[in-house]
Amino acid sequence: MIAETIKNSARILSGAAIAEEIKTEVFGEVKKLEEEYGFRPYLVVVRVGEDKASAVYVGSKVKTSEELGIISEHRHLPAETLQEELLQIVDDLNCREDVDGILIQFPLPKQIDESAILEKINPEKDVDGFHPVNVGKLSQGQKTLAPCTPAGVIEILKRSEIEIAGKHAVIVGRSNIVGKPMAMLLLQENATVTICHSRTKNLAEITNQADILVAAIGRAGFIRGEHIKEGATVIDVGINNVSDADFARELFDDAEIEKRLNTIEKRGFTLVGDVNPKEAKAKAANFTPVPGGVGLLTVAMLMKNTVDAAKMRRKMWKSEKVKK
Ligand code: GUN
């Protein structure tokens, strides 16, 4: 079962169950590619420096690849790596026949211009969907490799049977990784889309019109009950560390607070989204938890993009347009 109901509050949309479904589908596709066409998709993940969160994310990407039969290579480069050196590595990976997907984990050290690296990646191998060519295709409604996190949000909505067409979707956050591509994907699904950001005036007035509210601002518990329309679907894309016990008490209900306080005591922090979960559960009809929500979909969608990139390079991907 994809979703479970908790008391009289919002239906909690489980990212775990949906991510498992997608990974099972990807596993089946990889098996088919190997049995019928004699190859397995190949992903290279490059990490530069010692960012702790990146080490965890990359570890999970490599481990999931292996579980699904995708060949993966992890390149870990020193923090002093120069831009020229990384550009050369990307160039080499672009030229390698066996490599289907290239992912350069962000953030990169200060001496490296992230845009220059992104633009160097062959768009056909850009499994993050961040290359300007892929961003352009997405905005024109062409079939392409779409950024993994917003693509995962669409999967959560569809597989939870939440209608998108004709609904007002409000996104809070305008990043290139989530907010902007999220808007394009929701538009492709025929939602009416509004993007809000740090300079938006009367934020609550706009978010209160949202049938689907996507929070991707990077501020713990920023979206409160006053921002949410009764019966809305609230998708929380944020991942923040909270170490303050009093703040945690504002965010979590009786059923959860003890566990969260224990985590803070043991690990020094607990993971919290951009939405106040206690208040969201009281007003929303559907809500994605953190952790256990959207985050789990990002890796699953990366696996799907890697398989799609492998098929696209071999002209095995249907080239039909996604939308008019
Ligand atoms: N850093 C944080 N999220 C991402 C992501 O989705 N892709 C890459 N390449 N780096 C990230």
Image (cartoon, helix red, strand yellow):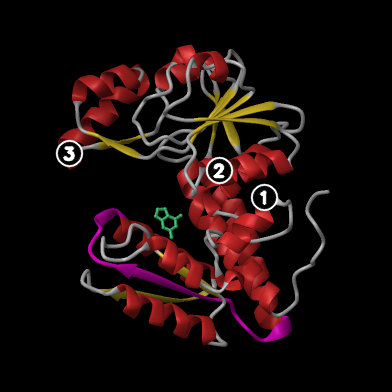
Mark 2 CB lies closer than 8 A to ligand 1: no
Where on the image, by quarter, is ligand 1? Answer: bottom left
Residues 211 and 72: in front is: 211
Q: Position of residue 289 (x, y in %)?
A: 46, 33
The image quarter in which residue 185 lies: top right
Residue ID for mark 2: 180
Asked if residue 255 can be seen in this view, the reply is yes
Q: Position of residue 136 (x, y in %)?
A: 64, 56
Distance between the alpha carbons at the discs numbered 2 and 1: 9 Å
The residue carrying pointer 2 sits among few (fewer than 14), some (14 to 19) or many (20 or more) residues within 10 Å by Cα, namely some
Q: Secondary structure at mark 3?
A: loop
81 vs 281, left or right, is left
Mark 1 CB lies closer than 8 A to ligand 1: no
Asked if residue 304 can be seen in this view, the reply is no
Distance between the alpha carbons at the discs numbered 2 and 3: 33 Å
270 vs 311, left or right, is left
Residues 313 and 160: in front is: 313
**In the image, which residues are magenta?**
36-53
Please state which amino acid type lies under the numbered disc 3. Gly
The residue carrying pointer 1 sits among few (fewer than 14), some (14 to 19) or many (20 or more) residues within 10 Å by Cα, namely some
Residue ID for mark 3: 268
Q: Which residue does the image show at 69% across and 74% down from the upper left?
A: 311
Please state which amino acid type lies under the numbered disc 1. Ser
Residue ID for mark 1: 139
Q: Which mark is residue 175?
A: none
Q: Earlier in the sequence, mark 2 or mark 1?
A: 1
Q: Secondary structure at mark 2?
A: helix
The image quarter in which residue 257 lies: top left
Query: In this rendering, which labeled residue sits more in front, label 1 or label 3?
Result: 1
Please state which amino acid type lies under the numbered disc 2. Lys
The residue carrying pointer 3 sits among few (fewer than 14), some (14 to 19) or many (20 or more) residues within 10 Å by Cα, namely few
